[in-house]
Amino acid sequence: MPRHAITIRGLTKAFGRNAVLRGVDLDLPAGQVTVLMGANGAGKSTLVKALCGVHRADGGEILLDGAAFAPPGPAAALRAGVVTVHQSINDGVVPDLDVASNLLLDELADGRTLFLNARRMRDEACRIAAAVGLDIDVTRKVAGLPLADRQLVAIARAMARRPKLLILDEPTSSLSLAEAQRLFALIDRLRADGVAILYISHRMSDIRRLADRIVAMRDGQVSGLFEGGSLDYAGAIRAMLGHAITEVDITIPPPGPVVLEVAGLQLKPDARPFDLRLHAGEVVAVTGLVGSGKSALAGVLFGLDRPVAGRIVLDGRPHAPADPGRAVAAGVFLAAKDRLANAVIPGFDIQRNLTLPFTPRHAGPLGLMRRASERAQALRSIRDMGVVCQGLRDGILTLSGGNQQKVVVGRWLAEASRLLILDEPFQGVDIQARQDIGRRIRDSAAGRATLVMCAELDEALEVADRILVMSEHTIVGDHRNEAIDLTRLMAQVAGSMDGMREPA
Amino acid sequence: MTPPSITDLAIRYGFLVLMAGLIIVFSMLRPAFLSPQSAVFILQSVAITGILALGVTATLVVDGFDLSIGAVATSALMLSAYVMVIWEMGAVAAVVLCLLMGAGVGLINGLLIVKMRVPDLLATLGMMFLLVGLQRIPTQGNSISTGMVLPDGSAAEGTFAPGFLMLGRHRIDFVIEDLVPLSVVFLIVIAVLTWVFLELTRHGRVMYAIGSNAQAAALAGINVGRYRIAAYMISGVMASIGGILLAARLGRGDVASGNNLLLDSVAAALIGFAVLGAARPNAFGTAIGALFVGILLQGLTMLNAPYYTQDFIKGAVLVVALVFTFALSGRVGRARA
């Protein structure tokens, strides 16, 4: 029986009426890597924030080495031995200082010494760096280091505190394979030193390499714990995504003519090229883990990114938009994911949010807006989408999340498109809004090709005629949404079947 | 609908009530304050800063800031004097060259900010220093006036064209003879045009969208960079119009004038945030803000308040206006956070 560095029992946390953690029970044994998986909104980040002192839990308890642990703030959590390295690497380092100052930053912030002794600092910093196998000149500025070295600096700084628990949040998301290998070697050493490690990631290659145990979270609870000799990766993914579909009422229409044809598309330098055909009238869902390339595909089609290689043909003409404006002009629309950052105009009312992409349609001579035309369009959109609101002129932020989402999806349904891409259109919406949005997407699908990116499998099964699976920035599965072999699909999501190439 | 609370009313009408109160107090203390001549004097004093403030409003709308407007205005002042006095060209040439200079400076500001990714405050601050120096180089730091001695020893023989001077000095008969200065007419026309552009056209709409969430605007297919550059060009052109009017009023290229232009016009635009509880840059608010500053200063002048108290009071009013905008209408601020 391994010693548990952290024991969590019945942890709850709610924001307003929104319960995010609903009784989490979890043990993190010392000297083991526990991988935490969970879709967006499953409660992973809230759990991490409760552990590192950013949030205080509403109920339940956390024991650190057997003693009650309720840090009032991040600094207290750090002193108690819980160290977090965040996904955004620059949160963990001060780019304008040299490596030595960064490594000793916590000591500097404590402020016990007034004057700095450069030589003593350098020696101390070298000792800390050596302890994690970081071999760099400590007088260099952090801003001049590659990303991976910055991350090692952040980790080394954390390790100087002899932590009991190290939390790594998607640490490899911006690292190359070689850089990731260096990180893994470090994690191996820390594990051998008896540090409990909580590793949050969706990269199956990372998980296979590191995991002693896998914990899956779903809807604010632990939905699966996998440990032992051979880990059940597909089982972990099933526990994370769930597929409690009771009724899927999809009638697959006969496919229309080909709208979009993609040949040899390569999204990343080390990704396998793939082909893709989308037909008029069909709704195609793309599923896959976070970071599997769904948004990268959407970005290439919408003119946000350039592909490494490949040819895209839209209605018989080459399609290589230089920017979103040109993509829209070519009839390719994208309802972006993460609506607050990418879609909502907080200063605008509902009507103006609805008509934003197509203002020329409602503008007369000299660009003067025609109120009646704009209002009529907004009313149509609200009716079609079933937006529940008091009036068109209310601020967009007065709406619930689901209704906001209906507005930002509805704005792209106002005009006919050739290809409509919806990136995570069901993100952060309630079940009613999810069904309304899904129905509207299907009802309006005739005449265009529709691509819906969704990490949650339930959502893909609810909305699509066809489901594509992406993994490692390529398409690894193509299923007609009729009597789907879910086990096979899950395995493809995990990237372990069909002779799929493993990353080096 | 719930009835509006006292706070809502204060946010919406507080500033207008304050302005009405000021007018009442001043006219009780000095009855001459209410005369048409006094009203026209106020308008004339705010005409130039008002026009500059409307330009800076355009940059505030796209979530930018233009600190170079004061320097653009004084550059236009010096340029128009140089064109007419030293090159001995006419009024049309002077006006056209000044407008082109303003548009060019705006374009460079915009390119620095959009293409070179220099933060807006720094880019326009740098441009301000550059222009303040540049405008003095051709005359080696001297003011420009007819008869001045040129570097080659000869005297400058050109004069300000009468048509040019009219822009700043002519008064139109309106009820009373010779009442309304032409510059006030320019202010009103420009204010109305700016309001129409920002509130009623799709371009204004799109600029507000950029200011509220540039990322979302870009993902809606809007060319964010082009609109940002256009906003700085509008600001530059407006500032050069202000400079032309200043030159026409002074009748000479005075290197020392226009020191307060930047602060006064930025104050007017920021006070505009608070008018009618808009909590965002807007043309109507900016015009009212400029008027407010004008009324305050005219009243204080008529009460014989010393000049240094005027700057103090201007600053205090600006701080109060910013509190109105950001603290009292905190719902807006929180929603954005």
Image (cartoon, coloured by chain):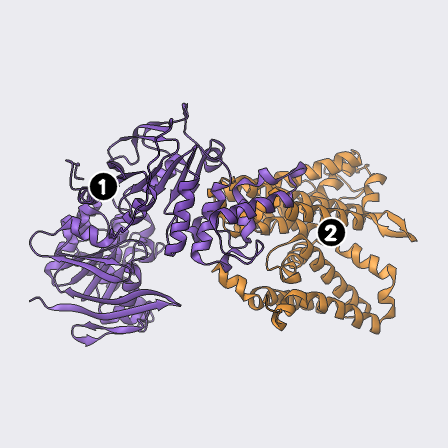
- Mark yes or no: residue A458 visible: yes
Q: Locate the N terminus of chain A by quadrant.
A: bottom left
Task: Give me the residue at 66% from left, 51% from top.
Answer: B70
User: Quadrant of the rendered structure where residue A461 is?
Assistant: top left
Task: Give me the residue at 67% from left, 37% from top.
Answer: A366
Percent of width and height locating residue B240: 69, 44
Q: Mark 2 belongs to which subunit?
A: B
Percent of width and height locating residue B221: 49, 39
Q: Secondary structure at mark 1?
A: loop
| Mark 1 neighbour class, 10 Å CA radius: few under 14, some 14 to 19, many 20 or more | few
Q: Nearer the viewer, residue A13 or B25?
A: A13
User: Quadrant of the rendered structure where residue A78 is?
Assistant: bottom left
Identify the residue position indicated by label 1 in the image.
Answer: A484
| Colour of chain A in the rendered structure image | purple
Work out which residue is located at the far right of the displayed protein and give it.
B177
Q: Mark 1 belongs to which subunit?
A: A
| Colour of chain B in the rendered structure image | orange
Q: Is residue A482 left or right of residue B202?
A: left
- Same subunit, tags 1 and 2: no
Identify the residue position indicated by label 2 in the image.
Answer: B48
